[in-house]
Amino acid sequence: MDTDEALLKQASIKTQDSTLVATFDIDGTIPGSGAYVVGLMGATPDYSSQRRLCIEFMNGKPIACYSFNRDQGIEEDYDLSGVAHSGSTITGSFPRSALNGLGKGHVLSAFSEADGREFQHGVPVEEAL
């Protein structure tokens, strides 16, 4: 996979009814071959509690939408109907509970992975929670 075609430019998250809507803008398009993941990492200020919200693609097609609670070691999968992608924008819907427990002052950043390896991390996230 040529990861130069999928640089994560920016990310945002907002609350919409009882849902969190995460949007990822990439420079280029989702790679047509290999595995590609975009996601958000949320943590308490001391990083003792962490959550990940992820959208995974394989060969350009979405195959998974899930959250991972590092404290409990629990992954929760969500319906792919909450994932949309068009050109260079990827959007995913997650339940509000996916970030529960992080509280005020939390840390939130975006990341991407390519073929199982971390590609980018620490990308700023615009929040409207």
Image: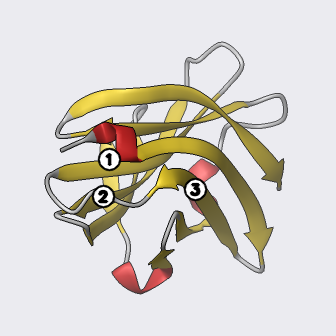
Seen in the picture, residue 89 relative to 70 is either above or below; the reply is below
Label disc, if present, on residue 57 of the rendered structure: none
Name the residue carrying label 2.
Answer: 56
Report the residue marked by disc 3.
24
| Between discs 2 and 3, the one toward the N terminus | 3
The N terminus sits in image quarter: top left
Query: Which residue in the protein does label 1 denote?
Result: 74
Q: Is residue 13 above or below residue 73?
A: below
What distance separates the C-alpha of mark 2 from that of mark 3?
A: 12 Å
Disc 3 on helix, strand or loop? strand
Please provide percent x and percent y for residue 7. 47, 41
Marks 2 and 3: which is nearer the front?
Answer: 3
Q: Secondary structure at mark 2?
A: strand
Q: Residue at image x 57%, y 56%?
A: 24
Q: Is label 2 in contact with label 3 (beta carbons under 8 Å)?
A: no
Query: In this rendering, does residue 68 appear at all?
Result: no
Location of residue 3 in the rendering, given as x and y in whole percent from the top left corner: 31, 39
Q: Nearer the viewer, mark 3 or mark 1?
A: 3
Q: Inspect this view and state whether residue 79 appears.
A: yes
Residue occupying image coordinates x 36% and y 60%: 30
Query: Mark 1: which amino acid?
Result: Ile
Q: Quadrant of residue 55?
A: bottom left
